[in-house]
Amino acid sequence: MCKHNVSFCLIYRCMVQKINKQQILVGILDHEMMSIVVMRTEKQASVDYLVKALSRYATRKEYITFFYQTGNHWVLVVIIPKWNKVLYLDSLGSQLHDNNLILQCHQQPPGNSYGFYAIHHLRIVMKKTNLEKSEDLDLPTNHVDQSVLSSIRTELAAFLLTQVIDEKGEFHYPRRGC
């Protein structure tokens, strides 16, 4: 069970399902296993998980991604095996000291978008596979239009209706005793 943010976890599951169904060349790791809590308390499990994922995806996927929560904010981390790069996509700007890891991306205005920018960045990365060089992986840096954020909400609602609430849905959990 996702402990961070229920709506974000549902969007995550929705994105995993979409990647698998459309056979997109992006691997997506479990953000729970890549959380700072797991990295600190179960370091070997986290390392083993990452090694297994890299072994599994390095030759089959263009990118290996995971969401990382920094307090109340989500960022997208993109590992690109063929270029030996790791990108850190942070819509609030990054405090990292190594600028080789940071790719400029949409900047979030004041407020709380609960990971929608991280999801939007993943949607962009999913469309940018089969690039010749890392410089071709560029992201817009302006604010995301509200219609884009609304489309993510709509996608989440559709996922809830078809995959969680519907009895035939992949993530349906029947309620008992109601």
Image: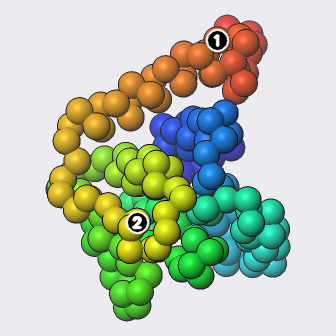
Instruction: Identify the residue at horizontal 21%, vertical 37% (top origin).
Output: 146
Answer yes or no: is residue 68 visible.
no
Residue 178, image x, y percentages: 67, 8
Question: Which residue, given by chain and number where applicable, does mark 1 sit on?
Answer: 166
Quarter of the picture holding the N terminus? top right
Instruction: Identify the residue at horizontal 47%, vertical 29% (top origin).
Output: 156
Question: Which residue, given by chain and number where applicable, does mark 2 sit on?
Answer: 137
* Total residue callouts: 2
User: Of helix, strand and loop, which one carries label 2?
Assistant: loop
Residue occupying the far front of the picture: 132
Depicted 59 relative to depicted 31: above or below: below
Residue 126, image x, y percentages: 50, 50
Q: Assess whether mark 1 and mark 2 are in contact (beta carbons under 8 angstroms).
A: no
Depicted 107 relative to depicted 81: above or below: above
Whether residue 78 sits left or right of residue 17 in the image: it is: left
Residue 82: name its quadrant: bottom right
Whether residue 127 sits left or right of residue 171 in the image: it is: left
Residue 20: name its quadrant: top right
